[in-house]
Amino acid sequence: SNAVVVGTVNVFVQERALLIREQAKGLYRVGAYMLAKTVSDMVNTVVMPTFVFANVVYWTVGLRATPEAFFTYITIFMLTL
């Protein structure tokens, strides 16, 4: 999601001094930091809220109560983000 990337860039500006210090020590590269930060932020800002919303909607609407139907719904829901 584009919002995750923009949020990560804003955090990157705030954590720049830490990144420069750790990069100078040879702990990791900037690309690795950005990838890890984006993925971890994506879990917190996209995947978890979406899964909770989809779960509540599925059971509230009263769709079929089988594991296959539920996981098919969740898969399609996540793919359409």
Image (cartoon, rainbow, N blue to C red):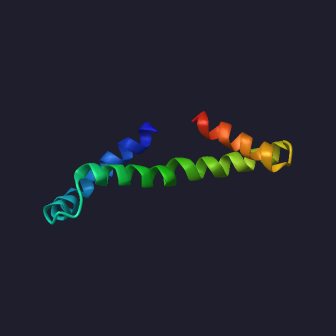
Looking at the rendered structure, the number of numbered marks drawn on it comes to: 0
Q: Nearer the viewer, residue 59 or 64?
A: 64
**Residue at (57%, 36%) from the top-left corner?**
81
- 54 to the left or right of 9: right
Q: Nearer the viewer, residue 5 or 70?
A: 70
Q: Nearer the viewer, residue 15 or 20?
A: 20
- 30 to the left or right of 60: left
**Residue at (22%, 64%) from the top-left corner?**
27
Identity of the residue furthest to the left in this view = 24
**Residue at (36%, 42%) from the top-left corner?**
6
Where is residue 52 shown, x and y percent of the image?
A: 66, 52
Identity of the residue furthest to the top in this view = 80
**Residue at (27%, 48%) from the top-left corner?**
31
On the image, which quarter does residue 21 sit in?
Answer: bottom left
Where is residue 46 shown, x and y percent of the image?
A: 53, 47
Q: Is residue 14 above or below residue 81?
A: below
Where is residue 75 shown, x and y percent of the image?
A: 66, 41
Where is residue 34 shown, x and y percent of the image?
A: 31, 50
- 62 to the left or right of 56: right
